[in-house]
Image: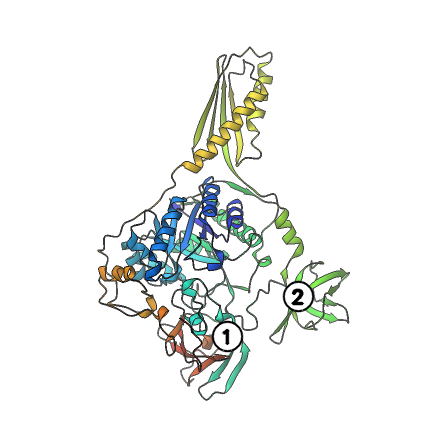
């Protein structure tokens, strides 16, 4: 029997609780430092509160310590790791192998920042004691199958949200333009900027386009294929997203996964509880740059978003007519006052809010950029957002109860759907009941009142209704039993796979390249123990001028219909430029990869 996990991001405690309530089996959130999203840090106290809330349902909490570390930071990083472990986190997600050398008593997951793309690399991490490997986003289904065939380690993959166009942990684009590094949790996202595409003679082929900006990932139609390929954890991206995004997207994937679980008996979910909502989730109504399956089904075009790096939202129609104060669409839609929309025409985009709707005429706050033929998208649905805010969502754990009433004692046993139980007794002197059937009905109703708790008492068995037990006493016993059951669920030990590293695994290459970012002595020690012959100085702490700063499965030539494999006669170098930043594009057609080399005229990078 395999567990299939839905893993949600959590920016903060509010988002963590929303993720749990709306169906996550696990959450991942950052501590105060050393996470790949520095703006999404949390105190140890907040992490501990999230752990307590999550563990009620058997939901695991993974904490991100996935930046590269310098020697002077190792002591602080270890202290933070041990504080997180003491707070009850179930796993640490790491990039820097120094943390593997610290003998931490916790599960270790290899972050997507490790850049795992091959069976050899995955097997090495498994033999080094990682209980889970988080795969690079750009892998195909076939890539994942090959990794699964070669390994037994748990595999986690992203299924929804923003995509890093460069291989994670191997991108230095941000560092090439500023002091902010993606490998240190402060990516400035230069991949979302507009660039000019030029040839080797400096002639402009395209101007002001977002040439590196790709659409967001949506693999909701591929979940079962991923399960069959060997994936055990489905990860939603978004540690900077708000609670509305979490509620909507997590519940959408919860429903999609549950549909699969209902049909199959070989897979189950690892946490407990049914989520009851008052809305129908729709990921198109949350932040999205447009949906893409990226490279899951092979290297393909149509994944870029040249016109804008911003959220466009759901498509609602084409502007049909325009007047001085409003416009109509070519189809019926449910746009209403308060909605946010954007119009896209001839590569340009403009946004506005809707003031009112009069019949078929939509009255925006401003008409700038709205013209006949423009495609209209809604990137903020006011009514849906209110519905998310007002939904009285509950996640409840089904339980059964048995109450045994005798002359000298009342015993209440409550057992949840996972077999966790508590027994509460009261030693009392009871009189005979005047009506045994009425007493049984009263007991049944009192014990079943589980509202306001995390439990739903679905069945109540009453024994010994010949004796009269006061309703107030039964209610007190029920409250005590449900609270004791909740605490018992929190305190029980969830399954963990803490695996040591005996040093016997062999690094599959002779050289650890500068792109692997060995920036401290413990990481260096890790690779030497595992057989590396040479370790290059980390590019993370070196100038990038003249260096490869990105490697990607995405290809601008492919996107433009100029694939060199399909048309080898195409010749000449290509460059992209933004201000003083200039990058030469390289094309490895054998591996179907694109690279960017820093050829900037001015080195604005700071250490």
Regarding residue 190, the answer to whether it shows in the image is yes
- How busy is the neighbourhood of tag 2: few (under 14 within 10 Å), some, or many (20 plus)? some
Q: Quadrant for the C terminus, please.
A: bottom left
Circles 2 and 1: CB distance less than 8 Å?
Answer: no
Closer to us: 536 or 449: 536
Above or below residue 245? Residue 536 is below
Q: Is residue 161 left or right of residue 100?
A: right
| Residue 454: percent from left, percent from top | 52, 37
Residue that mark 1 sits on: 211
Regarding residue 219, the answer to whether it shows in the image is no
Above or below residue 548? Residue 261 is above
Would you identify the image quadrant in which residue 335 lies? bottom right
Residue that mark 2 sits on: 317
Q: Is residue 83 left or right of residue 341?
A: left
Q: Is residue 413 left or right of residue 243?
A: left
Distance from disc 2 to disc 1, alpha carbons, whole Å, reads: 26 Å
Closer to us: 546 or 87: 87
| Residue 104: percent from left, percent from top | 32, 49
Q: Residue at x 56, y 24 (%)?
A: 475
User: Circle 2 — which element?
Assistant: strand
């Amino acid at each position: 029997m395999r567990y299939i996990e839905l893993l949600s991001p959590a920016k903060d405690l509010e988002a963590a609780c929303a993720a749990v309530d709306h169906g996550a089996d696990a959450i991942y959130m950052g501590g105060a430092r050393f996470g790949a999203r520095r703006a999404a840090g949390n105190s140890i106290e907040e992490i501990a509160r999230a752990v307590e809330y999550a563990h009620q349902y058997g939901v695991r909490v993974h904490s991100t310590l996935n930046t590269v570390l310098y020697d002077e930071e190792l002591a602080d990083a270890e202290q933070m790791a041990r504080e997180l472990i003491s707070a009850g986190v179930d796993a640490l997600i790491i990039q820097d192998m120094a943390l593997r050398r610290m003998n931490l008593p916790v599960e270790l997951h290899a972050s997507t920042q490790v850049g795992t793309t091959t069976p050899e690399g995955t097997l090495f991490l498994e033999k080094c004691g990682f209980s889970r490997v988080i795969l690079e986003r750009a892998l195909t289904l076939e890539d994942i199958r090959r990794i699964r065939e070669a390994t037994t380690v748990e595999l986690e993959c992203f299924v929804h949200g923003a995509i890093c166009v460069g291989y994670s942990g191997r991108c230095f684009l941000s560092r090439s333009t500023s002091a902010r590094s993606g490998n240190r949790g402060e990516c400035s996202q230069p991949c979302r900027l507009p660039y000019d595409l030029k040839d080797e003679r400096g002639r402009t082929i395209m101007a002001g386009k977002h040439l590196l900006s790709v659409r967001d990932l949506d693999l909701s139609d591929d979940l079962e294929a991923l399960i069959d390929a060997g994936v055990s954890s489905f990860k939603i991206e978004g540690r900077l997203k708000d609670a509305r995004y979490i509620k909507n997207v997590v519940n959408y994937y919860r429903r999609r996964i549950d549909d699969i679980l209902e049909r199959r008996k070989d897979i189950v979910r690892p946490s407990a509880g049914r989520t009851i909502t008052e809305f129908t989730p729709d990921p198109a109504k949350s932040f999205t740059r447009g949906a893409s399956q990226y490279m899951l089904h092979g290297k393909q075009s149509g994944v870029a978003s040249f016109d804008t790096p911003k959220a466009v939202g759901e498509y609602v129609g084409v502007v049909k007519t325009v007047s001085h104060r409003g416009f109509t669409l070519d189809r019926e839609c449910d746009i209403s006052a308060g909605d946010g929309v954007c119009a896209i025409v001839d590569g340009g985009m403009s946004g506005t809010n809707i003031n009112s709707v009069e019949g078929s005429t939509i009255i925006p706050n401003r008409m700038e950029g709205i013209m006949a033929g423009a495609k209209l998208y809604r990137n903020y649905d006011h009514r849906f957002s209110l519905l998310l805010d007002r939904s009285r969502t509950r996640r409840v754990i089904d339980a059964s109860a048995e109450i045994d009433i005798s002359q000298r004692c009342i015993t209440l046993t409550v057992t949840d759907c996972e077999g966790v139980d508590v027994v509460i007794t009261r030693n009392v002197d009871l009189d005979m009941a005047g009506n045994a059937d009425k007493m049984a009905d009263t007991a049944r109703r009192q014990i079943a009142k589980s509202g306001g708790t995390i439990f739903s008492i679905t069945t109540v068995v009453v024994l010994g209704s010949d004796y009269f037990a006061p309703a107030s006493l039964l209610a007190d016993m029920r409250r005590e039993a449900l609270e004791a059951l909740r605490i018992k669920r929190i305190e029980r030990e969830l399954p963990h796979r803490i695996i040591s590293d005996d040093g016997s695994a062999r690094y599959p290459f002779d050289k650890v390249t500068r792109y692997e970012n060995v920036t401290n002595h413990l990481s260096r020690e890790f690779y030497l123990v595992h057989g590396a012959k040479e370790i290059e100085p980390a590019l993370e702490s070196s100038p990038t001028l003249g260096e490869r700063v990105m490697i990607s499965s995405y290809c601008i030539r492919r996107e433009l219909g100029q694939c060199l494999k399909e048309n080898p006669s195409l010749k000449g170098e290509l460059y992209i430029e933004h201000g003083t930043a200039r990058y030469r594009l390289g094309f490895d057609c054998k591996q179907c990869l694109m690279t960017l080399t820093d050829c900037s005229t001015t080195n604005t990078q700071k250490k």
